[in-house]
Image (spheres, rainbow, N blue to C red):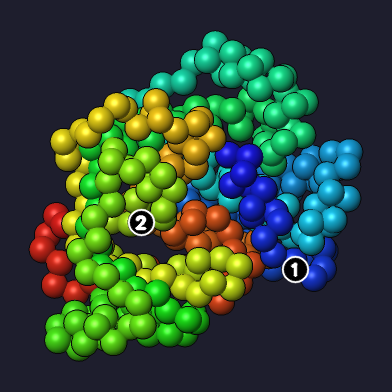
């Protein structure tokens, strides 16, 4: 998860310090975020943010890469939300991570200080390592049998992407015309991590069938629009287990992307001081202009949208 949080910390520069921000919660005054019926209170989030910001050298290194304390706040709150989603997925799939596994993984990483020096590690090293272990187990269980089929198009701007996504979600002849009119488009693209392990890092692996997503490529490279027409977790495995062909960090990142259906079913809201929830990357974006959007496609048969 080190690279994922590093990208979040270094990706954008936001003026002003997070801790000076103000605002009420999405629905509850004391909430940093709301996940389903669960509240992540400000009393939990703010000390976690402070603990990260006061680590020696972290802020200076972050600013040298063009980041800010606001990036730390979003990264911490994102990790707390993902932690809640991981717990839900673990309960649903009977994934159990024992204390002995956590101890061994912390030791293998070089100890708590080493873990905290290379990642946000909200809530401490043990909590962060437990998150990683759950995420890797989730990915190892699902990637071998995961198959996603989607129509994909590239847009030059967010506005263009959102307009196309809305058209595709509406369905009908107008949707097909909009797709064919995109500058770069491909119908019925199939993604199988079992055949191409690196495909495990595309956000497409988590978008449920019957959904249309618009999300940024990053670094000003435009936006991608995907209409997922089929997503199955019972495809025939191909080749060696994906988990044996990906490093633990990549496997953990894939496991988080696979939480997208859980997040959509559960619902996530952020306190505005921490930005806007991105339902595709499963992180807090600085504002709505930088966050992905997902729209339910019209006319999806029952049972095909999950």
Find residue 105 and report its horizontal and vertical position in percent.
59, 19
Asked whether, in this view, residue 162 is left or right of residue 219, the answer is left
Q: Tell me the residue that label 2 is attached to.
A: 204
Q: Residues within 10 Å of mark 2 (few under 14, many from 20)?
A: many
Q: Is residue 135 visible?
A: no
Residue drawn where x is 40% and y is 30% of the image: 245
Residues at circles 1 and 2 in contact by the CB criterion of under 8 Å? no
**What numbered label is drawn on residue 14?**
1
Residue drawn where x is 66% and y is 15% of the image: 107
Residue drawn where x is 61% and y is 67% of the image: 219
* Nearest to the observer: residue 200 or residue 137: 200
Q: Residues within 10 Å of mark 1 (few under 14, many from 20)?
A: few
* Nearest to the observer: residue 42 or residue 254: 254
Residue 184 against residue 76 in the figure, above or below: below
* Nearest to the observer: residue 37 or residue 190: 190
Residue 126 against residue 183 in the figure, above or below: above
**What numbered label is drawn on residue 122?**
none
Who comes first in sequence, dot 1 or dot 2? 1
Asked whether, in this view, residue 292 is left or right of residue 168, the answer is right
Find residue 209 and report its horizontal and vertical position in percent.
23, 58
User: Which image quadrant for residue 21?
Assistant: bottom right
């Amino acid at each position: 998860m080190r690279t994922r949080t590093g990208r979040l910390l270094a990706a954008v520069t936001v003026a002003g310090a997070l801790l000076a921000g103000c605002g009420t919660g999405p629905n509850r005054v004391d909430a940093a975020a709301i996940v389903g019926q669960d509240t992540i209170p400000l009393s939990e989030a703010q000390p976690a943010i402070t603990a990260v910001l006061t680590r020696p050298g972290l802020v200076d290194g972050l600013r040298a890469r063009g980041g800010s304390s606001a990036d730390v706040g979003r990264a911490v709150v994102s990790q707390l939300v993902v932690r809640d989603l991981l717990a839900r997925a673990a309960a649903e799939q009977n994934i159990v991570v024992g204390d002995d596994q956590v101890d061994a993984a912390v030791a293998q990483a070089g100890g708590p200080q080493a873990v905290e020096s290379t990642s946000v590690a909200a809530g401490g090293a043990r909590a962060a390592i437990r998150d990683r272990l759950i995420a890797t187990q989730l990915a190892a269980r699902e990637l071998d049998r995961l198959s996603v089929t989607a129509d994909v198009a590239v847009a030059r701007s967010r506005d263009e992407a959102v307009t196309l996504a809305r058209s595709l979600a509406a369905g009908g002849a107008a949707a097909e015309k909009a797709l064919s009119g995109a500058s770069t488009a491909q119908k019925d693209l199939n993604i199988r991590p079992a055949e191409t392990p690196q495909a495990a890092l595309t956000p497409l692996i988590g978008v449920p069938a019957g959904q249309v997503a618009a999300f940024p490529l990053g670094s000003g490279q435009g936006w991608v629009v995907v209409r997922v027409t089929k997503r199955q977790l019972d495809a025939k495995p191909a080749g060696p287990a994906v988990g044996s062909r990906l490093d633990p960090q990549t496997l953990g990142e894939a496991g988080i992307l696979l939480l997208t259906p859980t997040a959509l079913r559960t619902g996530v809201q952020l306190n505005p001081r921490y930005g806007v929830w991105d339902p595709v990357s499963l992180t807090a974006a600085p504002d709505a202009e930088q966050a992905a959007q997902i729209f339910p496609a019209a006319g999806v048969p029952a049972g095909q949208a999950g």
